[in-house]
Image (cartoon, grey):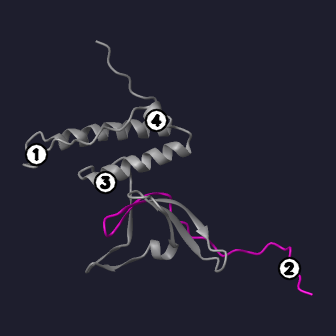
Amino acid sequence: MNQTSTEPQELPPLHATPPGLYRHYKGGWYEVMDTVRCSETLQGMTLYRALYGSQGLWVRPAAMFAQTGVFQGKEQARFVRHDPAVLALQDLATAQALITYLSAVALRQGIELDSALRAPPIMPNTCCGRGCNGCVWEYYFAALMRWRDDALALLSGAAMPTAAVG
């Protein structure tokens, strides 16, 4: 007769990947959700989702996620964690990843940023592509930085800035 033990088993230590915003060495943006354990091997697995396209969920061995190696001919980390508060907003992929990331963090806290704060700025569609001084993209990224700062303040529970009355 085959009996299973009801005694709790000691699990090996789980080396967690800190949740947050990450960029892959190839340029894609991802949100680390958690570190989970494989039911077959007990290996730590990083659970993350893409912040582009269909935003699918993925798992990768945590050791591989944290790996540094020679990628694209240079020594670098496979994924690099970024602080949303100081993230340089200079390209559309980064801007869209930031909006998607902060919106998801807010939803997990029960906050809909579009109604609790305001919608993020709308991407410009009138750029001529000539690199003008005062390009519409400069204004977009500046507005997005203000939205990011206000969203982070709201998510941290800080008081929101009020508009000056004049």
Q: Residue at x 43, y 50 (%)?
A: 101
Q: Secondary structure at mark 3?
A: helix
Mark linked to residue 128: 1
Residue 147 image position (x, y, % from top left)? 35, 37
| Horizontal side, residue 144 vs residue 46: left or right | left
Residue 37 image position (x, y, % from top left)? 62, 71
Mark linked to residue 154: 4
Q: Which residues are magenta?
A: 1-30
Q: Nearer the viewer, mark 4 or mark 1?
A: 1
Can residue 69 be spotted in the picture? yes
User: In the rendered structure, which amino acid carries the disc numbered 2?
Assistant: Thr
| Horizontal side, residue 45 vs residue 64: left or right | right
Q: Residue at x 43, y 46 (%)?
A: 102
Label 4 CA crowd tier, 10 Å (few <14, some 14–19, many 20+)? some
162 up-or-down from 136: above or below: above
User: In the rendered structure, which amino acid carries the disc numbered 3?
Assistant: Thr
Tell me the CA gap for discs 4 and 3. Answer: 21 Å
User: In the rendered structure, which amino acid carries the disc numbered 4?
Assistant: Leu
Residue that label 2 marks = 4
Q: Nearer the viewer, mark 4 or mark 2?
A: 2
